[in-house]
Amino acid sequence: MKIRSAISLVLGSAAGALVLAGPAPAAEVDVPPFYVAAAKLPKAGKLGQVIAKEAVATSIPNATAWRIAYVSSDVREQPTIATGLVVAPKGPPPKAGRPIVAWAHGTTGTAQNCGPSQLLNPVQELNEYFLVGGTSWTDFGIPAVGDFIQDGYVVVATDYQGLGGGGRHQYAVAATQARDVIDSIRAAGNLGLAGAGRKAVIYGWSVGGGATLGAASMPDYVTRNGTAFDGIEVVGLAALAPYDVAVTAPKGALDDAAAAKMMEGLSQSFSDNPMDFAHFAMTLWALPAAFPELKLTDVFTDDGAKAIDAIMTRKCIHAGADTIVYTYGATYKQLLRDPPANAGAWTRALLKGSVAPVRPVAPVIIYWGTKDVVVPPVMGQLYRDQMCGLGANVTRVQLAGEQTHFTTPTAAKPLYVPWIKDRFAGKPLADGCAGGSSGPTP
């Protein structure tokens, strides 16, 4: 998700991570048999109820793992099927139970075959395509999974809805993806892997960082009863380079003129090169799945809507970007409608799908790098300021050195692993809202 650092562009870029769709066509891509079967299952059952599972081999010491499909819901409380991975220490849980750690992954794409759990050997440390040493065309794996298994935790990693379980993926709609993360905790508990344990921590990166912040501000959903695993207690949330659209929005009522200006700014900000445009288009493609009053042709020409729909239903993010570059070259801007229609509805949907201005259910820690040009760190600062004003405990940590968006997970790992352990242990935590934002760590 490409987002600029200037305040005037932050709203545009964050929105550029969320927006565009219509009625979902039949599956257009091949997926492994587990996901073919999962997508055909009825969206029925309690939140977090596991409706299918499949054993997965892993080289993580003392670990056993499964692919799962489970019941979740979206921002409109419509039932969905989400897929993902569950990893647990071998053997039965101890009498006191096991804590649960839930991972929220970053951008992979919008097609049904873009779920990280579908890759070969998916249960391993985070494997980033962008970095030297990456072994795939996409990001997959679970950061610190070996550490967490060694510490006796159950680890669950959602794919989110629409990335293997059927339905159109609601990319970067934090209010939907946060539900998928919360329900993944219930799914792990539903399998009996946590035993009597109810404590959980959520951690996520990039778009998953947005889902993490979104989950923090959903107390009613976290404490909901009648689920497949009631009584979960989220005791901490760690967000790595997170985005938050709503916190960057203009204050006060957003009238039609302001909405139109915002949409115009989005189009201009994310049309200056084909790669930015590809991320913007994926975002636009996804939002109407969450908000059916929106139409793809509001923001794209008729021909543009057909092309973008064909690309985003069939390809993950990097292949989709390559297709736009190859097919349209410098003419890709012609796919956009100028000016966009229905701007008021689009901007309202953007804000409704983002992080709610509600005090977090537990302490939040944010890790960021000074060289992040994908998600501007100012989003985390604005989020902290907003939530501290609501009486929350939000710590913001600048990582040492010149960390980019893609090096943030590795650089932050030595910090968030002990932080999570301390949250499960119930250790006292300093007030992250006291004083200014943290500078470089030692």
Image (tube, rainbow, N blue to C red):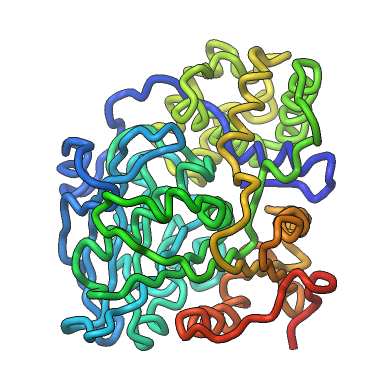
Q: Nearer the viewer, residue 31 or 363?
A: 363
- Residue 64, image x and y in percent? 21, 76
Q: Seen in the image, is 392 located left or right of residue 282?
A: right
Q: Is residue 302 above or below residue 106?
A: above
Q: x and y percent of residue 96 in the render?
A: 28, 83
Taking depth in this image into account, of 237 and 362 the one nearest to the observer is 362
Q: Nearer the viewer, residue 284 or 319?
A: 284
Q: Quadrant of the C terminus?
A: bottom right
Residue at 28% across, 72% down: 87
Q: Residue at x 74, y 80 (%)?
A: 400
Q: In x, y percent, where is residue 304? A: 55, 18
Task: Name the residue nearer the viewer: 261 or 395.
Answer: 395
In the image, taking residue 6 as reference, residue 85 lies left or right, namely left
Q: How many marks?
A: 0
Residue at the spot 80% in from the left edge and 31% down from the top edge: 252
Which quadrant would residue 407 be assigned to in this image? bottom right
Question: Toward which corner of the image does residue 341 lie, by quadrant?
Answer: top right
- Left or right for 137, reference 15: left
- At 60% from the left and 65% from the top, the residue drawn is 240
